[in-house]
Amino acid sequence: MNPSTSRKKKKKPTYYEDHNFINTIFSWSLQDIFNQDLYINKVEYIDLYFKSIEQYFKSFVYPLLDETRANLCSSMEILSSLPYAEVVSLEKKLSHSCGRNHYVVKTDTWKNSSFGYGKELYKTLFGDVFILADFKPETVNDLTRSGKMWCFVLSTGILGEEIKDDDDTTLKVIASKDIDIDEMGQKSLFIIFLTNITPNRRIWNALHMDGDSKLIEKILCASDV
């Protein structure tokens, strides 16, 4: 028997196995995102020494959430200058992941693609967070207008490849709420890039890991020596 055939392939982690990180972000209202004191009563002073591994990990949870909130807040303050594109098509995608709203979004050419201090060209990535709306918001106040639909969506896959700056993009996304495809199909839709949460999500998963923690335990116990 070939050893390579008997060896089981390790299952690749998905964006859905994130210990509720995405659900937490999707649960935030606009007021939450712009509330600098959202976690003020939960963020504690991070000491140099910890009584347990659990205490060590938990001490970083709310600071990480607050950092993620602040990143979203900073981006939403400059909505008019962020990369955006008109949506060419929006399709619902069947998935076995419970509690998720999956879609495939195809965009037209991205506008404002040169952004940031280095004026780097925007390119869609896994973990990008967007606003999907049936209008092009210029300010946060536009998102509060009655009769308008918008939600957060998160990129979980890029279909095809962006070769040129003027290429369209096809994304697999999950949305913060269910989208009525029949209704939205009759409207012009726009997608606006906000931020990428992949680094923070990786840290979040590390804070919730269930693996071997002997090394961390040794470090935490060093103060007792």
Image (tube, rainbow, N blue to C red):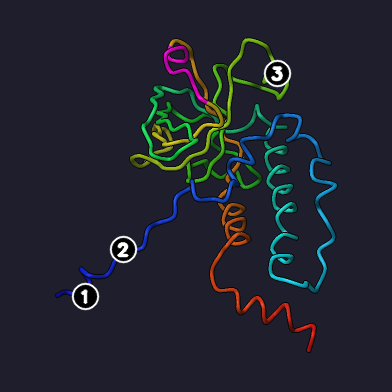
Label 3 residue SS: helix
* Residue 5 on image: x %, y %: 20, 68
Q: Is residue 52 left or right of residue 153?
A: right
Provide residue 129's location: percent of width, then percent of height: 56, 38
> From what the image shows, is residue 52 above or below residue 204?
below
Where is mark 1, residue-wise?
3
Within the image, what quadrant is residue 192 found in?
Answer: top right
Q: Picture coordinates of residue 128 (x, y %)? A: 53, 42
Mark 2 touches mark 3? (CB < 8 Å)? no
Mark 1 touches mark 2? (CB < 8 Å): no
For the residues labelled 2 and 3, the Cα–Cα distance comes to: 47 Å
Q: Is 29 rendered above or below residue 150?
A: below
Quarter holding the C terminus? Answer: bottom right
The spot of residue 102 in percent (x, y) is 44, 33
Residue visible at 65% across and 35% down? Answer: 27
Instruction: Name the amino acid, label 3.
Output: Thr
Image quarter for residue 157? Answer: top left
The magenta stretch spans residue 183: yes
Where is 49 relative to 116, above or below? below
Q: Which residue is mark 3?
A: 144
Name which residue type carries label 2.
Lys
